[in-house]
Image: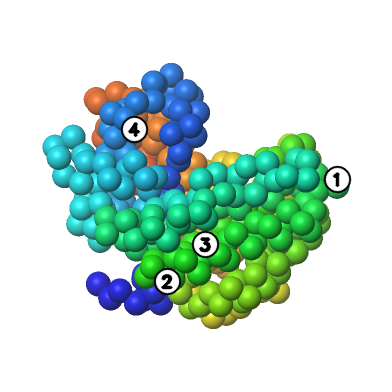
Amino acid sequence: MSERLEDIAVKMVADGKGLLAADESTATNKKRFDTIALVSTEESRRDYREMLFRSDDAMKKYISGVILYEETLFQKAANGTPFVDIIRTAGGIPGIKVDTGAKPLAGFPGETVTEGLDGLADRLAKYYDAGARFAKWRGVISISDTLPTYGAIKANAHALARYAALCQQAKIVPIVEPEVLMDGVPGTHDLDRSEEVTRRTLQIVFQELADARVSLEGMILKPSMVIDGKKLRKASVEQVAERTVKVLKETVPSAVPGIAFLSGGQTSEEATAHLSAINGYDLPWDVTFSYGRALQDAALKAWDGKPENVAAGQRAFTHRAEMNYLAAKGSWTK
Ligand code: 13P
């Protein structure tokens, strides 16, 4: 495989394929496992991820790469095969989440800045050696009547840009993920407010990326959709698609090869329907999915932590992966 950043970035988003975000931190993984009353241990996390990564059909046909948490990047399947090899054998690209989480931003009550820049260059070299060819960093923007502030957007955008520059220096494609929360507090904002905040956020992110001399051709944007708050949720599929496309066209340079959305708390079906509607527009980028919950929720439930349900879990995952593949080609129908 070509090791040029531009080629890796294109491969991550081309032909309807998308990314499986399986990079839940140990704390987030515990929350997910709690929903099926499964204790989160190194072994149960391994079994769960092995179930996903050994879904051959899904991995070969619909998934271009997998975002891993550090533990998983270095982890082996039950028979001793490294997960990285299983992903690569299916034709996928291994990736790694490198931020260390959103922490309270001093002086900005209710807002966070994502940490993880200290020592990042050294960690990236280690991840590259382990097989990672792309990385992810998530900045979080909360909406309320008074938030977000310019200061918080700027701090997050600056960190994203510094992370992206370090990745490119390490020959790793950065996924730049500024998430405008739909399920934040209070989560009652309307579509207009989401549009305004998403536009402002992306404007500032691309300004910071330019200032940091990040090559747009060698990155992927992972944005949230323009969608009303989870406690309101009135906007139609068509409205969400229209506003999302409008904001992206206003803010994202066409030199960026691909956009891979997060699902952010949408139901699995909503996330597919929105992606398909967005792809009904004429767009200058490949637009696909980089879903966590929207690809995994049904699979986690079907698996239920039981070895005898592995095939059922894989079927559920494969179904969602196929639906999102069709959506990324704009050819999904209900
Ligand atoms: P969701 O699709 O569940 O939002 O997860 C994607 C992700 O990687 C968030 O950082």
Q: Which residue is mark 2?
A: 169
Find numbered disc 1 in the image and state the secondary structure of the residue it sits on.
Answer: loop
| 187 relative to 21, above or below | above
Find numbered disc 3 in the image and state the secondary structure of the residue it sits on.
Answer: helix
Place residue 194 in its image quadrant: bottom right
Q: Quadrant of the N terminus?
A: bottom left
- Counting from the top left corner in percent of width and height, residue 323 is at 44, 52
Crowding at mark 4 (Cα within 10 Å: few <14, some 14-19, many 20+)? many
Of residues 31 and 309, which is closer to you in this image?
31
Place residue 231 in its image quadrant: top right
- Name the residue at 79% across, 58% down: 150
Distance of mark 4 from mark 1, alpha carbons? 39 Å
- Counting from the top left corner in percent of width and height, residue 242 is at 69, 64
- Name the residue at 38% across, 68% down: 170
Which numbered disc, 4 or 1, marks the residue that appears first in the sequence?
A: 4
Q: Which residue is mark 3?
A: 163
Of residues 258 and 168, which is closer to you in this image?
168
**Residue sitting at the far left:** 79
